[in-house]
Image (cartoon, helix red, strand yellow):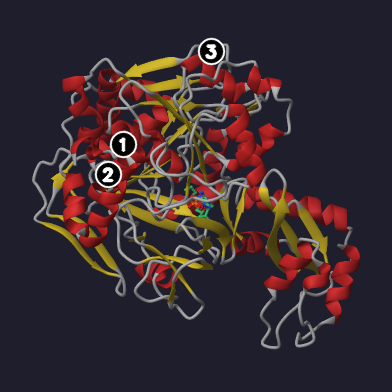
Amino acid sequence: MKDLVYRTADSYYKAKQFANENPEAFWADIAGNFEWHTPWDKVLEFDFLTPEVKWFLGGKLNITENCLDRHLKTQPNQTAIIFEPNDPSEAAQHISYSELHSRVCRAANMLKANGAKKGDRICIYMPMTPELAIAVLACARIGAIHSVVFAGFSATALAARINDAECSILLTSDGGFRGAKVTPLKEIADEALTSCPSIKNCIVLRRTGQDISWNPIDLWWHEELEKVNDVCPAEIMDSEDPLFILYTSGSTGKPKGMVHTCGGYMVYTAYSFKNVFQYQKDDVYWCTADIGWITGHSYIIYGPLAVGATTVMFEGVPSYPDYGRFWEVCAKHKVNQFYTAPTAIRALQKHPTDLVEQHDLSSIKVLGSVGEPINAEAWHWYDKYVGKHKCPIVDTWWQTETGGILITSLAGVTPQKPTYATLPMPGIQAVLLDNKGNEIEGETEGILAIKYPWPSIARTIWGDHERYKNVYFSAYPGYYFPGDGALRDAESNFRITGRVDDVVIVSGHNLGTAPIENALNEHPHVVESAVVGFPHDIKGNALHAFVIPSTEVSANKLAEELRALVAKTIGPIAKPDRIQVVRGLPKTRSGKIMRRILRKLASGEHDSLGDVSTLLNPEVIEEIKKNN
Ligand code: PRX
């Protein structure tokens, strides 16, 4: 496949058919577009029951040579990263491929000088500065496994992630700018490191210049860089060597460290990036996600850089200094592809449209959406005010676990349909299942599942392969089960209807209710709690916590303390919007909390609870309704 990309519907449908009939030949053809030190000797080995998936077996490569070195031959002066700072009065930075290469190599040498080697885990807890991307790539350069922790997580959450992966180095920053706020990242990191014995060095980037405390293991980033040069040959990696770990919430308390490997992840992120956004040479592409999430890994860093694109990194927030910031940045950098989350669109939609209209958005060719279902109202607003009815919108469905976009339209190549992610990418075999695990055909609704592996599927959960098997491969043997429901129209378009497990997507963030309940239960006056999602007009979903106190308490005071506890244990993003003190939770006779009923109660659907007479304690329902 030349140039990795389908530019016409015809070539797309042909590729799809070919991929379904000859998946290995299909992926081998795509993988041939990259630089390998040694070609693979087998394309794929898999068994969804064990489960085990391996791609491009025996292949040797380094992803940074594909993202950096090979572009030096053809476009060394092309801008790789445009950094747009939080404060609009601070100058943007344009970092060319050759400069990025040099900075990555120097940072890689800094890591090596501090003892890092292939296979070590390095935790990155940093704001959205170019050094964050450089840190990620520097780890990849030397074969160290990066574990980026979103800079909005609390000290407890950071420590849990560092300890799970036994990271040896922490890369952080004095602080981070986010809108009008300055986040005390070093202070949070210091607190985390009081319980992280594996960390030997903490390398600190100076970003805000704020006062910080200093410990014996701390080193300044800029001082460490001065001690090394920028010549760093890439570590030769096996296709299946881990590239990174990224944590995502699960239905139980502990976050899941999803492990992605070098070869397949590179192939799939580049392939999907180029096809979905129809990126063309010299385009400027902007994904507004944070690198702390998978979207930032795959579609700010690896996918775009692997194809030699210009990718924008934005440090700030959509509301600062005003709600026109996104559009100001699009106009300033003449952005051609713009990729954001429905929650951001819904927040912006609440503000006067001249905040959009006063900026020249004529450069935009493609719009994208990710992270949660996009509701019709937000879709149409995006189409009208940002796209001026001229830009295709790609609604991209995927997950941390999938590594790359699996279901989407290709911008301007395949048909779009508002609120529908539409069709699986060529090479992706998506099906709908009924509750018993039988495939169901045609126009229908069911459980989304994927029946054949793709190169960027996560290979395991760090340190817990059994959990990987249980969560993704056990409910419906022979399939990958992503945890989402979907419906399919007569043209085979998929519309994702939402989670079918205890994960709630709040403002595009994937939050497990179990870890939040665990945090609430830590409070000395909480006996039991249950957290469910309810629809929210900006966040998509918000959290409603039902808590049973042990003594008579002031509900307001308890709620305040519980919010603070959740912020401290997980992070401010997980704070419930509502905390309701109750005397009991509806339970089955076997003692299981009936979350289905709590979800209805939290959503105000008091009249559609169904039969509650079989509950152990139906009387609690009336009390909950009364105070709801
Ligand atoms: O429920 C789906 C929702 O986000 C979940 C994955 O979350 P996370 O691993 O944090 O990755 C988010 C960024 C890829 C999915 O299981 N989701 C993601 N994209 C969409 C979506 N739901 C509907 N439509 C989407 N386009």
**In front of the other: 13 or 473:** 13
State yes or no: discs 3 and 2 in contact (Cβ < 8 Å): no
Q: What element does badge 1 sit on? A: loop
The disc labelled 3 sits on which kind of residue? Glu
Residue at position x 56%, y 46% in the image: 418
State yes or no: discs 2 and 1 in contact (Cβ < 8 Å): yes
**In front of the other: 626 or 420:** 420
Residue 178 location (% of width, % of height): 60, 28
Residue at position x 71%, y 88% in the image: 589
Q: Which residue is mark 2?
A: 11
Name the N-terminal-most of marks 3 and 1: 1
**In front of the other: 476 or 167:** 476
Q: Which residue is mark 3?
A: 90
**In front of the other: 591 or 410:** 410
User: In which quadrant of the rendered image does the C terminus lie?
Assistant: bottom right
Q: Which residue is mark 1?
A: 7
Whole-angstrom CA distance, mark 3 to mark 1, is 38 Å
Ligand 1 contact, mark 3 (Cβ < 8 Å): no
In this rendering, position of residue 181 left or right of residue 185: right
Ligand 1 contact, mark 1 (Cβ < 8 Å): no
Q: Given this view, does label 3 or label 2 mark the residue nearer the observer?
A: 2
Whole-angstrom CA distance, mark 3 to mark 2, is 45 Å
User: In which quadrant of the rendered image does the N terminus lie?
Assistant: top left
